[in-house]
Amino acid sequence: MKTEHYETIVIGSGVIGAAAAATLAQRGRRVGLLDQFAPPHIRGSSHGDGRIIRYAYPDALYVDLARHAYPLWQAWSERAGEPLYEITGGWDCVPVGSSVMADIERALTTYAIPYERLNSAESNRRFPQFHVDDDLAVIYQPDGGVAFADKTVRAFRRLAQRDGATLIDNLRVVSIEPDGVGVRVASATGDVISAETAIIAGGSWTGHLLVHLAPGLLPLVSLQVQVAHFPVQGNVDHTKNAMPYFIDYSTPLPHYGLPQIDVPGIKVGWHMHGVVLDDPDIETIVDDTTLPDLQAYVRRRLPHVSPEPSKIITCRYMMTPDEHFVLDTLPGLPQITVATGFSGHGFKFAPVIGAILADLASGLRPEIDISEFGIGRFTTT
């Protein structure tokens, strides 16, 4: 058994934990970044060739957060010496006159974010990759884009290590215990790591990591979702150079997708639809209902894409009941910060969330108002 000590331990090295560790290390803090696997890996929520980044949200809270995230994406790209994202434009399909249409436009207008509203004919002419029916409209936001998922995780980890952080992979945490004003973390191999503060960013394993610290405190649900890549057929350009990301609110659960990045084909997913994972150690559960729905969506909306997938992959959602994040210290344990509940839309905010978590773990008050992300919303009656 060995014992190590750091100023801050970050448990979980997906994009959120890695961003937090990189920010702390950049600020000169002695950091240990732990993961039970070797990220990026397919067991979490941060893998793949791309994720959506956007301003276009029905909730102004996230438009404001995006305003803080975008400059940090550029800053981290410069530090990494490579682009971690690319602007493609964003295409949101909404029923004409719907509340979601009004909410997106109101949220963008609140922060003076430019956008265009296109009717179906205008969208079909301008974006031949999609077919839009007459009862639908499109909100086009030119600053939307794609973040390069695996590349971003690797970059944050590399930069954290370059600035002095210790990366400890393939180490499974079995207990987290307050130790006076600090924290002691024990691993499955018997190693003990202590620190002044800890950040828990364990993805699907977060509930298990909290079970002894704060049993029943957070009503978290872990989902496994399936997404698929569908090959392009024909000569319409579907690469990130010509096609925007897309989110389609014309169905009860939105569909979304990315232009072709590295993996051949268009990535298409069905937001919030998946299989509940009571045990996060289960690697894969096949959901027989997802693929037929995605194929039907492709036939309806993407006329130049084959409905026969070239690749099917899984991803994890960690959800709170209100679908908002948790960014807070544990009640009575200010040395332990929790980052969870990113519900399939947290990746785009990783640079700013990393800064928020670094502040919390350092005893600082974040410059951004995070009161909406507090644990107290689940504990008050």
Image: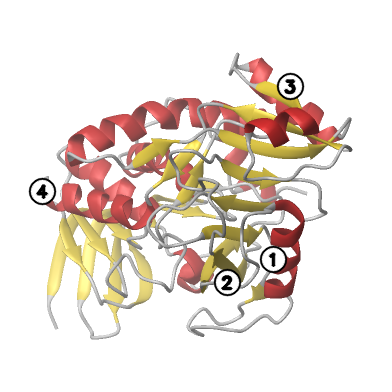
Label 2 and label 1: CA atoms lie apart by 9 Å
Q: Residue at position x 89%, y 38% from top?
A: 135
Evaluate if marks 2 and 3 touch, with contact meaning CB atoms under 8 Å apart.
no
Frontmost of labels 2 and 4 is 2
First along the sequence among labels 4 and 1 = 4
User: Can you see residue 152?
Assistant: yes
**Foreground: 116 or 106?**
116
Label 4 and label 3: CA atoms lie apart by 42 Å
**Residue receiving disc 3:** 106
**Residue receiving disc 4:** 162
**Residue receiving disc 2:** 309
Of all residues shown, which one is farthest toward the front?
235
Frontmost of labels 3 and 1 is 1
| Classed neighbour count for the residue bearing mark 1: other residues with Cα under 10 Å, few (<14), some (14–19), many (≥20) | many
* SS category of the residue bearing label 1: helix
Evaluate if marks 2 and 1 touch, with contact meaning CB atoms under 8 Å apart.
yes
